[in-house]
Image (cartoon, rainbow, N blue to C red):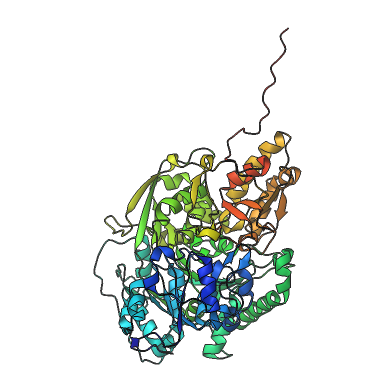
Amino acid sequence: MKPPETVRLTPGKRVLYLTKDPVAIERQLAGDLDLTMADLTVDDLLDDINTDAMTPAWVCFSHRPEDIARDAYAGLIVDGRRLFPRDALANGNFEVIVSGFRKGVGSSRETAAQAEYYSGIRIAVAASFAPIHARNNVNLGMLMADHEMLRRLEAGEGLPLGEFCDGYDPITRLVVEHGGLFPFSKAVAAGEVELPQPKTGRRPMTMAEKLLARHLVGRGEGEQRYVQPGDAVVVNVDGGYSHEFTTAQVHHFLEQEYGPDYQIADPERFAVFEDHLIYADEVPKMRAFTDKIDTLRDLQRDFQRHTGTQDFSARDRVSPGICHEVAREYLINPGDFIQATDSHTCMGGVNNALAWGVGATEYANLAHAGFTMVEVPESIRFELVGELPEGTTAKDLMLYILLHYARPQKTLNRVMEFTGPGVASLSMDERATLTNMATECSARTAIVVADEETFRWLAEWRPDADIDAMRARTVEPDEGAEYAGGVHTLDLSQIRPMVAHPGDPDHGIPSDPTNGAWIDEIGDVGIDIAYGGSCTAGKIDDLGFYHRVVAEAVDAGLKVHDGVRFLIQFGSQAVEEHCREQGMIETFERAGVELIQPGCGACIGCGPGVSEDEDEVTVSAINRNYKGRSGPGRLYLASPLTVAASAFTGRITRYAPGMFARPAVASSPS
């Protein structure tokens, strides 16, 4: 439905303020309290509301948005109980929802936006929005506003629709004016909308700008065109993928919009993966949802058979691996533009590609059409110099960037470029950690400059690939390219082992990956679980880090510390096979490590390694420590080396070579 040209608050409808005071939220939901912006400041509102809080994993097991909306904000837990009972948002007669900074951080799951929209919310107000969540709002037809606009609305003023589009590119404005992506796309197909064309002249470009310019629809063979941040462009997509958590919605939306005989463009360029829920039945709290999970799997199989996309389904209940890991191993090439229904799609940027996550609506639309609409994003560049010290990894570097650049929003909605001589000191697996965690920075994506190691690695994984053709498709930034986020030199030699602490969400301090701290400053933190795995830390080099520590501990006669579970999950079947060939698995088993076959899992609360009560403490190599995401306990993010070392000491411990060696026994005097 198209929004009105003048937007007003509806008499009798309410505004819900997500305050740092949970009692105030409960009173609003109960109808005992009505607030206005005159009663509050922005500092009183919750920041960093993540998509896991809006729709936890189990809520996403329903694929119909109407059903999902019934459990809106089911993950907002305070003192062990839900702030939002079932149907509370819909039954509260709210049409506006208000929060602080960085609304919608975390996963690309469109269900978070759907939960609000299908509960009757038509305006989301925040000081800033995470980029994928903002796009999902636009695609659904949800308006977004800032707090000053809300003050004017509450004063009875009518605001022109155009004001809700301030800062948007011309195509996004058209999507908003048509009431969402599907109505806009149908208008384009019917010839009712003329798409604007970029008129940017010759200029130096960043890596992201070059790749988008190459993918412009209508670009002639060999024709050089240019783009700049803010340009609204229509670009061809080289490929994409979805997984069993999201494919059902894609299938559902395409049937709704285009009928049961719908088709997608170039199905061989798209793929489905069965990786996220493969071990959900091993988590007691998830067993109640077995029927819904089976439905998601069945609908993904229906979609795959209907469309003919590439099939990476599990065989005999064993997944080929996490979609992002397998995609970089076999699917994503230098110079590609890739879209997929998961926020960690950005991991593909390690291959010198442009890749980011989108919601189910946007993915369904681009898979159907073969192209998509993009606003050219700004960029921020990290020039890496030096080498990481012994005992420090790319995960520590990312925790440093999260604290010093993401927390103050320097990376927000920007492409993070990694260049400089320090890149050569990092393996491809370590570089993949950098691109993988761009989404935790609320960045649009990340991309690494290509070098000889890039091509050596690709040739190793794809012996039949045309490496020369891949070389020809790579990009590097032009001299003089503009970086709105600046160019920042990072001396790798100055990075130290870090963690991200779990915060204190019950008292307004979000659990968040930006809560960085040096390990030697957090004090004595005992642990119950040490978890190594996920797309961030289930790669070959990550398993090498775990093995380095475990081998030293085993040589010293140690096993995993009493009372601690140490779990390691492989990122793909290829990673598991490598570990088997190298003899790592025997070492892990001797130490008492629990090994898990490839797939997602504990990272999203759907596999072994989740905490089971609030008192449990986990040190984990995953990417997010949002409360409730990986169980109800307190979760610290750390590097694979730190996770492994902590498993043997029973407390969060930085790794140092030889730390488990027995002290030499002095010989007796003769």
Name which residue lies at 58% across and 39% down: 655
> What residue sits 63% from the left and 52% below the top?
618
Give the farthest residue toward the left: 201
Give the side of residue 49 with respect to residue 545, left or right. Answer: left
**View extreme (top): residue:** 670
Q: Is residue 485 visible?
A: yes
**Residue 531 located left or right of residue 214:** right
Look at the image and tell me whether residue 371 can be seen: no
Q: Residue 430 in the image: x percent, y percent?
A: 52, 50
Residue lying furthest front = 32
Which residue occupies 36% across, 72% down?
38
Q: Indicate the quadrant where residue 416 lies.
A: bottom left
- Front residue of this view, candidates 291 and 28: 28
- Residue 153 pos. (x, y %): 35, 80
Residue 305 drawn above or below residue 78: below
Instruction: Residue 303 in the image: state x and y as whole percent.
Output: 61, 80
Front in this rendered view, residue 543 or 165:
165
Number of numbered labels in the structure image: 0
Query: On the rendered image, what quadrant is the N terminus found in?
Result: bottom left
Q: Which image quadrant: the C terminus?
A: top right
Q: Looking at the picture, how far across and down is residue 409, in whole percent?
A: 39, 59
Q: Quadrant of residue 554?
A: top right
